[in-house]
Image (spheres, rainbow, N blue to C red):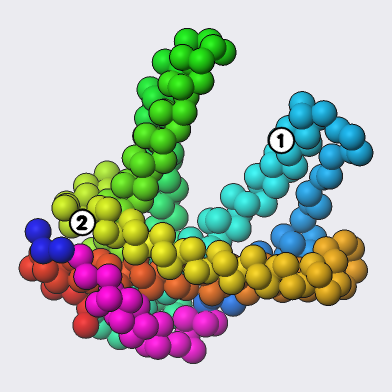
Amino acid sequence: MPKFDMGAAWDDSMVLLKSHSALTLTIAAVFLFLPTLAVSWFGPVPLEPVANATFQQMMATLQESARQAIPYQLLTGVIGAIGGVGIMRLWLSHTGISVGDALVFALKMVPTMIAVQLILGIGVGVIALGLFLPGIAAGGGAIGALLLFVAALLFLGICFYLWGRLAVTSPVLVDRTLFNPLAAIQESWRLTKDNGWRIALFMFLVTLVVLIVAVMLGGLVAALVGTGDGIGRMLTGLVEGGVAAVGGIVSAAISAASYRQLALRGGSEIFS
């Protein structure tokens, strides 16, 4: 397989972001910005550990905060996925398509997208279990700690590689109208052959830039007005919603651009 060209993929991402810009921004505002803003404003506030809390108390507080946030995160995740697939449908459509048609298509794809996430989640869970089980079974000694450390490194490396190999699963679903999650995963695996590490690095670099900008904006807001109730929470919500919208569009663009490059080299007819 030819080597994946990160520069060409980035240039194509910019082309995609400029195409249907008004429509994609509208979808992003409704499906990415507003849900994140609503959760930030009206969802549960993260719990803070009590003063002089022990490690166990801090972990319990974090677990309770995560438990409260999970339903909201799942809801915003599904809504955001609908918006992302709708945007990709506009970008990858071979013929003219309306926003309504793109969103109807995205709604039909919801069960498949959920199935893909479940399959990948179970797969990653099985890998984690296989890697960490020896260290857990070895107990709390030096050998056990070493095994857990090695397992953590291997797990991060495997996840990074899988990120690259499965990066074009969503564009495959959208462009080829695949409702079979296993077929979409298999096709992504085929298209990214010999390019998993390069694609993962490309995705990582773009994601890192988005995260740095998000942290800087969040830190600026926190320094100016704080993050408590009132104006602080309102501005924090606006920042989080904006980052979710921009990050979601950029993520969809680089995934779609990667797919276009790989599918073209594979001889498939794609949007141009």
Q: Is residue 122 magenta?
A: no
According to the picture, the residue beneath numbered tag 1 turns out to be 63
Q: Residue at x 41, y 28 (%)?
A: 150
Q: Residue at x 67, y 52 (%)?
A: 72
Q: Residue at x 32, y 69 (%)?
A: 256
Residue 262 spot, x, y in % from top left? 18, 66
Q: What kind of element bears circle 1?
A: helix
Residue 186 visible: yes
Q: Is residue 133 above or below residue 77?
A: above
Question: Mark 1, mark 2: which one is toward the viewer?
Answer: 2
Residue 227 spot, x, y in % from top left? 83, 63
Residue 188 spot, x, y in % from top left? 24, 54
Question: Who is closer to the viewer here, 159 or 85?
Answer: 159
Give amino acid for label 2. Asn
Question: Total label count?
Answer: 2
The crowding category of the residue bearing disc 1, from other C-alpha atoms within 10 Å (few below 14, some 14 to 19, many at least 20), is few
According to the picture, the residue beneath numbered tag 2 turns out to be 195
Sequence order check, earlier mark of 1 and 2: 1
Q: What kind of element bears circle 2?
A: loop
Magenta range? 4-26
Name the side, left or right, on which 98 lies relative to 171. right
Question: Who is closer to the viewer here, 136 or 30?
Answer: 136
Give amino acid for label 1. Gln
